Amino acid sequence: MVEEVSYMALDNIRIDWNADFVGEMKSPTATIPVGDQPNGMQPYHLLFGALASCFYSTFLSITAKKRLAFDSASVEISGEKRQTGDVRTLEKVHIVLTVKNPSNEEQIRKSAVLGARFCSIHETISKVAEMSLEVRIES
């Protein structure tokens, strides 16, 4: 039996599926294909994308407060699942932040650490997986 809970939603998405694993995810701002179809996002693609966007948004907020500048950045997320247990949850997640031409390399690195610490999705995933962060600087 599923308990019905009343709460205020932070956000909302909807996925409409066919009888197979082919669907369309709709948010208030976009629609993307999901599942087993051309260009369909898979479950861990969506989770890692959520982590990357939350982390980067938080990182940007911190760099803005510190008045740091850089030309561009990329975030790459990879992970491994546990090989044991009934539910194979994530065991390790690795974030690589690459920043081009930062105004202050040391402060960019510190901002990345804070970005991970204050990203709510990072903190949620960290309850089940070992999280690691690598910051690369490019000129």
Image (cartoon, rainbow, N blue to C red):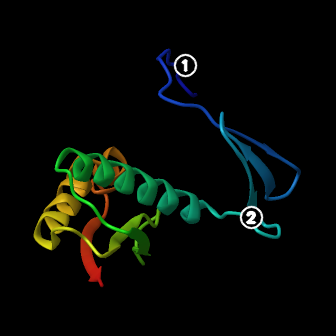
Q: In this rendering, is residue 8 above or below 25? A: above
- Residue lying at the far bottom of the rendered structure: 139
- Residue lying at the far right of the rendered structure: 19
- The nearer-to-camera label among 2 and 1 is 2
Q: Is residue 76 left or right of residue 14?
A: left
Q: Nearer the viewer, residue 38 or 3?
A: 38
Residue 126: where, in percent of width, then height?
28, 57
Look at label 1 and name its amino acid. Glu
Helix, strand or loop status at disc 1: loop
The residue under label 1 is 4
Residue 101: where, in percent of width, then height?
29, 76
Q: Is residue 41 left or right of residue 97?
A: right
Label 2 and label 1: CA atoms lie apart by 31 Å
- For the N terminus, the image quarter is top right
Q: Nearer the viewer, residue 90 or 95?
A: 95
Q: In this rendering, is residue 16 above or below 32? A: above
Task: Say which residue appears at 66% left-offset and 38% top-offset.
Answer: 27
Look at label 2 and name its amino acid. Gly
- For the C terminus, the image quarter is bottom left
Task: Say which residue appears at 74% left-offset and 61% top-offset.
Answer: 35
Q: Nearer the viewer, residue 73 or 79?
A: 73
Q: Is residue 124 left or right of residue 52?
A: left
Residue 40 is tagged as 2
